Image: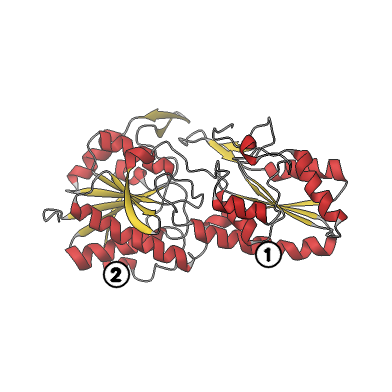
Amino acid sequence: MNKQTKRIGVLTGGGDCPGLNAVIRAIVKTADNDYDVEVIGFLDGYEGLIENRYRVLEVKDVSGILTHGGTILGTSNQADPFHFPVLEDEDYIYLDRSSQGIRNFEKLGLDSLIAIGGDGTMAASARMMEKGLPIIGVPKTIDNDLAGTDITFGFDSAVVTATDAVDKIHTTAQSHHRVMIIEVMGRYAGWLALCSGIAGGGDIILLPEFPYDIEAVCNAVKARNAAGKRFSIVVVGEGARAQGGKMVVDREIKTSPDAVRLGGISRQVAAQIEGLTNIECRVTILGHLLRGGSPSSFDRILATQFGVEAVHMVMRGDIGQMVAMKNGSLGMTPISEVAGKLRKVTPDHPYVQVAQSLGISLGVPVDEPLEEYFVEEVAK
């Protein structure tokens, strides 16, 4: 145990999700109960570190936040320390503010920083580590696309929300004999669409990893109609795209390190299905609904485990590591091995095989191997 550690910093970066407050709570309570160590919370992710905005977190500050969505520290997905947006003459310029962040860290007398976030936060953390900042990572994202861990907190809560939406869509689909298309988040990975589609009884699931053949999609719809099932539920990941096509971009945020914001593929799919089958389609885009609300019991436990273990890692001196869940047990993965990588759905994953055994269409012809449609690259 590192007996010299006196102060720990913590920040939450990237998009919010259920479970962030549970991690903060676990960090503060473990630091206090097990080590008598003070915790400093930076506001709005790396932005707070750079601008020296923080608060001391005491046990009373985290009492009652386990069930709350969001983060009491605030977050930002535009605060890359190495490409920090600064407004000048009504336009943005981008500066490297990483050294300022490190100076603020040192002035506060901090011994380590726990960075809670997804791939963007881990990528920034890896670069900050190269400049000497001692960091422990905690994996967070509703997309479940972070390398180095089997699961991230926030994902289960989003699956629960998406599944509930699919459940509710079922009744109106049956009543009106329509094709109902539900678009979920997930960016460039299809975990959220795949799991909510299976859990909600979806008939067709379209994923970024397997560009869809629209004829195969329509054939699946027509086959259901021919069998007397006069409705179909299509669950679409926002990063899905047609064979030979590109992902549908809703907007671009120029101040963000990842400027692309996906959204709208469901409308394209609806138009294609209506045009080829003459069956009425309706679209529901769940969007940020998936980020909000109280964390599921699973995520409360997982986030708490991650928070407790992160403090233990700090005290053991496991700097540069990200806490991870591997094969049902807590472990570690070097942050440098996580940065810049995505964990994607593969053709041999058990959930994919389950979907195929259930007769769920993944948007490819039934007589062709799924492996031939698999792509790993991102085609924005």
> Residue at the location (54% across, 45% down)?
345
> Residue at the location (34% across, 70% down)?
63
Give the labeled residue for mark 1. Answer: 167
Judging depth in this view, the residue of 48 and 225 nearest the camera is 225
Which quadrant would the N terminus be assigned to in this image?
Answer: bottom left
| Left or right: residue 294 compared with residue 339 | right
Q: Give the mark nearer the N terminus: 1 vs 2.
A: 2
Return the x and y of residue 134 as percentages of the image width and height.
23, 43
Give the labeled residue for mark 2. Answer: 60
Return the x and y of residue 329 as percentages of the image width and height.
36, 59
Give the colour scheme shown. Answer: secondary structure
* Secondary element type, mark 2: helix
Q: Is 79 above or below relative to 221?
A: above
Q: Amino acid at mark 1?
A: Asp
| Left or right: residue 358 compared with residue 307 | right
Judging depth in this view, the residue of 90 and 235 nearest the camera is 235
Return the x and y of residue 206 as percentages of the image width and height.
66, 46
Inspect this view and state whether residue 43 appears. no
Distance between the Cα atoms at labels 1 and 2?
Answer: 39 Å
> Residue at the location (31% across, 66% down)?
61
| Left or right: residue 311 compared with residue 368 | left
| Left or right: residue 103 compared with residue 280 | left
User: How many numbered marks does the figure carry?
Assistant: 2
Judging depth in this view, the residue of 25 and 101 nearest the camera is 25
Which quadrant would the C terminus be assigned to in this image?
Answer: top right
- Using a 10 Å C-alpha cutoff, classify the residue at mark 2 as few (fewer than 14 neighbours), some (14 to 19) or many (20 or more): few
* Secondary element type, mark 1: helix
> Residue at the location (58% across, 35% down)?
375
